[in-house]
Image (tube, rainbow, N blue to C red):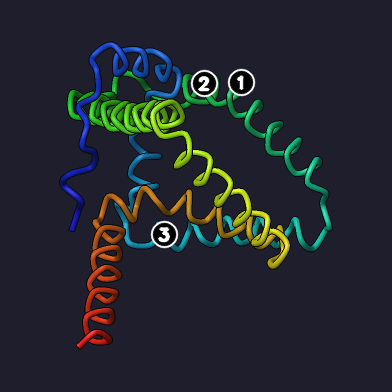
Amino acid sequence: MEDQQTTSYTPSSELSVDLKTSLLPYKQVVPTLFDYFTWKKQFYPAMIVSEITLTFLSIWFFEISVLTTVSLAATVFVLLDYFLPIVISSFVDPSKWTEEDDAKYNEVCNVLSAYWQIITTRYAHWSQLRQTKSKVYYFAVLASLLTLAWLGNTFNSLFLSYVLTLSVFLYPGLKHHGILRRGIDNSVNFAKNTFFKKNQ
């Protein structure tokens, strides 16, 4: 079941147009990547987990440093940014691009724009909290930083990076299929039932 309420915001037309323009060199692959990360096929989640796991196992096996890992990741990104449009223009026939593909591309850009608007809006709210409720803001920031420090000291940094990366890449599919929302609702219901039972 897909999550019908992908976002609670309607993306601005200007933001959506800017995104469509910036993604034009990758136009043919954007819908495919969106289908991949939102699990259009059942085996896509397994592929995502396998790819990320293999990458981190390679980092662990070869004992690659953090700086080298970041540099290699940036190198791959730059190479993809340069060669991907060339490969797309060479192997993809633009005449096969249909109105349905164009509608899917516009839909993906609108979804991405809506997510970006959510991020910027929440960041603005968080920044405003520093001015309106400074004590709450600094308490939350300090608590978060101390929690991160404790986690970093308790668990292996590579393992934490693996879990974080896996969560980021699986989030679109979990959100799209409503799994994340159901998990949160089940957790809240479990906590309520447990709390009320203890107080009865």
> Which mark is drawn over residue 45?
3
The alpha-carbon separation of the residues under discs 2 and 3 comes to 26 Å
Residue 8 picture quarter? top left
Q: Nearer the viewer, mark 1 or mark 3?
A: 3
Query: Height in image: 148 above or below 121?
Result: below
Query: Height in image: 14 above or below 114?
Result: above
The alpha-carbon separation of the residues under discs 2 and 1 comes to 7 Å
The one nearer the camera, 84 or 95, is: 84
The residue beneath circle 1 is 82
Q: Nearer the viewer, mark 2 or mark 3?
A: 3
* Res 29 visible: no
Q: Indicate the position of residue 166 as horizontal and vertical percent values.
A: 52, 56
The residue beneath circle 2 is 85
Q: In this rendering, would 103 be left or right of 59?
A: left
Identity of the residue drawn at 81% across and 41% down: 68
Badge 3 marks a residue whose secondary structure is: helix
Give the residue type at disc 3: Pro
Badge 1 marks a residue whose secondary structure is: helix
